[in-house]
Image (cartoon, coloured by chain):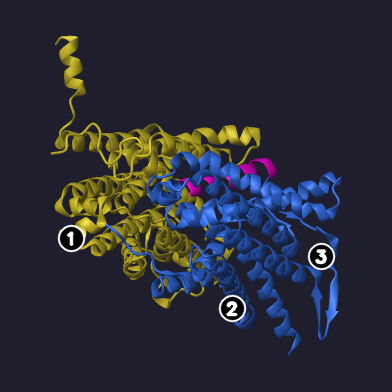
Chain colours: A blue, B yellow
Amino acid sequence: MSGYLLQQLVNGLTLGSLYALVAIGFSLIYGVVRLVNFAHGDLMMIGAFSTLGLVAVGEVAWAFVPLLVMAGGFAAGGVIERLAFRSLRGAPMITGFIVTLSASVAIQNLGLMILGAQPRNFGFPSVFRERLALGPVNIAVIDLAIPAATLLLAGAVVLFVQRTRLGIAMRAVSENAVAARLMGISLNRAVLAAFGLGGALAAIAGLFWGGKFGQIDPLMGFVPGLKAFVATIIGGVGSVPGAVLGGYILGFAEVAFVGFMPSEYSGYRDAFVFALLILILLLRPQGLFGREEEERA
Amino acid sequence: MTPARLARRLSRRLSQRQALVLLVLLLAGTVVLLELLGSGYHRTLGALTLINVMLAVSLTMTNGFTGLFSLGHPAFMTLGAYVAIAFTYPAARKSFAMPDLPAVFSGIEWPLPVAALIAALAAAAAARLVGASVLRLKVHYLAVATLGLIIIVQSLALNLDGLTRGGRGLTGVPRSAELWLIALATLVVVVGCWRLKHASIGRAMLAVRENEMAARCFGIDAVGLKITAFVLGAGVAGFCGALLPHVVAVMTPKSFGLMLAFNLVAMIVVGGQGSILGAIFAALAFSLGSEALRPVEESLGLYGMTQVVVAVALILVLIWRPKGLFGLDEPLVEVK
């Protein structure tokens, strides 16, 4: 296998992992509240900047930074849910949308106000930059760390959702919220868990995003967040393994588009992703692997 | 006249004819006042405000009447802007700024009203093309697909340098958007949407919004009506997109983006989705309010503050008054 092809595969794997991490959150949140959380991508931004903050403080051993960032993401997800969404539970779907969109715009512009629009360099941790010789190619440590961490975290989420009481409660709510409440399941806890877990994964994705691409800014999260939602749709909204699979499919497709099309088309990579979205929605509105939701009167 | 009688007369709603006369007088008065007394700054602000009114009214028709949730207005505006500029840009500079423009356009320099109407038709045609498929999608998918539409159009504009000069943008667009033209267009859009809302087709649209399945059971062609609302809205968006660069003399691929999509949605939600007067009031308040906040933002160095205010205000409105100011109703005017 040529080095170029292998490098493209690695790029696809890395990008796919980042999409997968964010897409899991979309799926979890959609599952419990039937809402696409547009502000979800902006948690990546929060994760990336809190990493920079922690590194700047310098008191924390670097191995603990990811854990703290994930805790911060969990808290941020929870706070967003509490402030913006809880009082609107049961409101029409469009209302929910506009609120998530507003939350996203508010977070981005608060970021601009506080942090400024200038992109910052992101060099954490420096071990990410080192390269390992693997056969014909040099692979950066980060390109191995991201997929490994993603698979680990995705596995943990699946186990959590399948095995723990809270995970089972979340699945019950997503199956039928009214019946779940009648069984004594706390809706608030299930919803908080979904937003928190999603937030933690998005925040760590933000750390990785900074580590991979080297620059972060307050608007960095929105478009990748939308693309991760495209990944969620590809995998079928509401399913965690589907979200991971969708993330990898989108990551490979995007890298293949940029890597193997003539270079004058590479400016169209975002356009390609959204054209793909529209195409998939038309051919299989329930996603490639999702099941169809029936429409009831 | 006793004070009590005066109060009763004032609290009575206007008839539709009175409201129309009042609207014409207000628009004409604004144009005359700005042309005679206003500075260039005031005229530009007036033009941008009226364009926002048109955009909000057209979006309240697309989204409010039929219950769609499209965020795609900026996509159609961008398309309309570049179409119009292809007709109006100074012929002498076309070969330099837009080398890839087809030869048919190279010698022509058409008046803006004609170019803007062509832009509106182009945007409506594009919406028809996209809408036929996209509008079958459910609420949340439609929202994301229309956001995607904005990103697709922006990438096209950014990468087709030969037509758009890419990220550098087209400067020196003639400032030919006269206030009277914009005011006239506003009148047509407002009255048109009003007539539509209160005609049988508008009532059918509202039925789709309230309960699509029930409306379909009555034989209403829900998808067809959604496409109609989407295409009409996109036409107005294309028209406004054509006007805007002719007010500010510049057009870039990022001129109309995601933030504008959000602000338009904010206006129609605050006004009450489907309320034409609500959209007008909200557009006026937004345009003049954000302009008033701008110096504050600049003096404090807190760029983005206005957007935060708008976003938080919107969340608060949705929590405490989810139907917006007026819901679907029209205040002040008698509707038979």
A267 vs B109, nearest the viewer: A267
Image side of residue B105 versus residue B299, left or right: left
Residue placed under numbered mark 2 in the picture: A257
Is A14 covered by the magenta stretch? no
* Circle nearer the N terminus (3, 2): 3
- Pointer 3 local density, CA inside 10 Å: few below 14, some 14–19, many at least 20: some
Which residue lies at the image location 40% right of the left edge and 49% below the top edge? A178
Is A114 covered by the magenta stretch? yes
- Pointer 2 local density, CA inside 10 Å: few below 14, some 14–19, many at least 20: some
Q: Specify the subunit that label 3 lies on.
A: A
Which residue lies at the image location 46% right of the left edge and 38% below the top edge? A87
Residue A166, how many percent across, how many down? Answer: 58, 52
Q: Specify the subunit that label 2 lies on.
A: A
Residue B134, how many percent across, how many down? Answer: 37, 67
Which residue type carries mark 3?
Answer: Phe
Residue A99, how many percent across, how many down? Answer: 47, 45
Majority secondary structure in the magenta region: helix
A67 vs B223, nearest the viewer: A67
Which residue type carries mark 2?
Answer: Phe
Query: Real-space Cα distance between discs 1 and 3?
Result: 60 Å
Whether A228 is drawn above or below B287: the answer is below
Residue placed under numbered mark 1 in the picture: B217
Range covered by the magenta-colored residues: A98-115
Q: Which mark is residue A92?
A: none
Which quarter shows the C terminus of chain A?
bottom left
Residue placed under numbered mark 3 in the picture: A128
Q: Residue furthest front?
A: A183
* Same chain assignment for discs 1 and 2: no
Q: Is residue B40 visible to us here?
A: no
Q: Nearer the viewer, mark 3 or mark 2?
A: 3
